[in-house]
């Protein structure tokens, strides 16, 4: 079989498009994570600790936390805080977490991307367009 010029050209164009899209997504992921680290350091690390390991019986861990299984709850909890007992990895915590109304939707998305990529076994962006509709539905 002979390769036609337009055929080869179309194939190369296809490859370039696929790779360009992938790396654009990857650049976005890296950007969200970089920002997420800063937002985490400034707003969360005091309690949950820099490596997400939590602090004794007071502050639950984020690293390998089974609570991360319900991402919608995590998104709402970050903005609106949390009161009453919760169970994380089989251990009960009962200490209020303050709401974080100072965080924009974008900052919440950056935090969630960072937390899930660092501690939740994800390799993808949770973008601001994912987070905004969820934040609107939170029970306050
Ligand atoms: C003043 C301390 C404090 C700060 C600051 C704080 N948290 Fe929390 N966080 C808590 C406590 C306490 C709980 C458990 C709440 C309960 O017992 O009902 C909690 C629970 C959580 C949970 C669910 C349980 C788990 O460990 O998976 C997540 C997720 C979470 N926090 C993320 C964050 C993020 C992200 C930030 C930064 C925006 C943050 N927290 C800031 C104290 C804090």
Image (cartoon, rainbow, N blue to C red):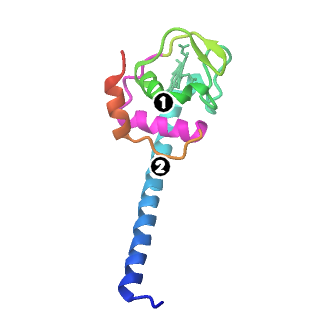
Mark 1 nearby-residue class (10 Å; few <14, some 14–19, many ≥20): some
111 vs 28: above or below: above
Residue beneath disc 2: 29
Q: Secondary structure at mark 2?
A: helix
Compared to 125, does 53 lie above or below? above
Q: Is residue 61 above or below residue 124?
A: above
On the rendered structure, is 118 left or right of 18? right
Give 49 or 93, whichever is nearer the viewer. 93
Q: Find the magenta span and give its range.
A: 98-120
Q: Residue at x 62, y 25 (%)?
A: 61
Q: Within 8 Å: ligand 1 and the Cβ of disc 2?
A: no
Q: Along the polypeptide, which appears first: circle 2 or circle 1?
A: 2
Identify the residue at horizontal 51%, vertical 33% (top origin). 40
What residue does disc 1 label? 71
* Residue at 38 percent of width and 29 percent of height: 103
On residue 13, the disc is: none
Residue 93: % across, % down: 60, 12
User: Is the residue marked 1 within 8 Å of ligand 1, measured from its CB?
Assistant: no
Tell me residue 104's x, y (percent).
35, 32
- Magenta-highlighted stretch: main secondary structure? helix
Q: Nearer the viewer, residue 87 or 54?
A: 87
């Amino acid at each position: 079989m002979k390769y036609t010029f337009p055929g080869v050209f179309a194939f190369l164009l296809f490859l370039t498009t696929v790779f360009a899209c992938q790396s654009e997504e990857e650049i976005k992921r890296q950007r969200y994570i970089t920002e997420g680290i800063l937002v985490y350091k400034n707003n969360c690390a005091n309690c949950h600790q820099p490596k997400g390991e939590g602090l004794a019986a007071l502050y639950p861990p984020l690293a390998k936390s089974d609570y991360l299984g319900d991402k919608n709850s995590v998104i709402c909890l970050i903005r609106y805080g949390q009161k009453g007992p919760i169970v994380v990895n089989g251990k009960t915590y009962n200490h209020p977490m303050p709401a974080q109304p100072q965080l924009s939707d974008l900052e919440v998305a950056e935090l969630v991307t960072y937390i899930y990529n660092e501690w939740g076994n994800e390799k993808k962006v949770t973008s601001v367009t994912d987070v905004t509709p969820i934040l609107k539905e939170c029970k306050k």
